[in-house]
Amino acid sequence: MTSSNVRSLVRAVALGDTEQAQTLNDRLNDDERNELGVYGTAVLSVCLDHRFRDDSSRAAIDRFVEAMRSNYAKADPPLKVLAIEGVIRAFAGEDWILDEISPEDQQATQLPIIREIVASSAELRGRIDDVLTDADQLATAWASEG
């Protein structure tokens, strides 16, 4: 079961509440930071499945990445666009790409991608608690497989 701090942090990021997300991030302990990696991956998986369910082609991924590049043009630190593309392509079945992206860069892409997908989907914004619960169940299933 995901801690309430981690779940609340991801919820705040997904909904664009940067002030709340920063406050929650500052409160995380080391165990919760580790948990955030797994839970973030699970939330990302649920969001990517929603976003690319009907079209996970290179063209669809390219359009999404270009939108992120534009929307986060002034991000500080800047987004690593190739890492974002690689993470999305890995979820779409090209998992060998992750060998070329550091674990730190993989994790750094998770929350911005989640934010972009949720921001562009009224359905996900309206079901954010369901999305987070689905991700919690997915993370729990991964832990039981490990």
Image (cartoon, rainbow, N blue to C red):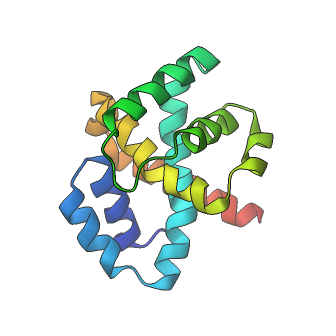
Q: Quadrant of residue 68?
A: top left
Measured as percent of width and height from the top left, residue 40 is found at: 50, 57
Residue 57 appears in the rendering: no
Q: Is residue 10 left or right of residue 125?
A: right
The quadrant of the image that shows the C terminus is: bottom right
Measured as percent of width and height from the top left, residue 89 is found at: 66, 33
Measured as percent of width and height from the top left, residue 115 is found at: 36, 44
Residue depicted at 31% across the width and 77% down the height: 26
Residue 64 appears in the rendering: yes
- State the residue in front, 12 or 77: 77
- Vertical arrangement, residue 4 with respect to residue 145, above or below: below
Residue depicted at 47% across the width and 39% down the height: 47
Q: Is residue 85 left or right of residue 118?
A: right
Query: How many numbered discs?
Result: 0
- State the residue in front, 49 or 140: 49
Residue depicted at 55% across the width and 41% down the height: 84
- Vertical arrangement, residue 3 with respect to residue 112, above or below: below
Residue depicted at 39% across the width and 56% down the height: 77
- State the residue in front, 11 or 105: 105
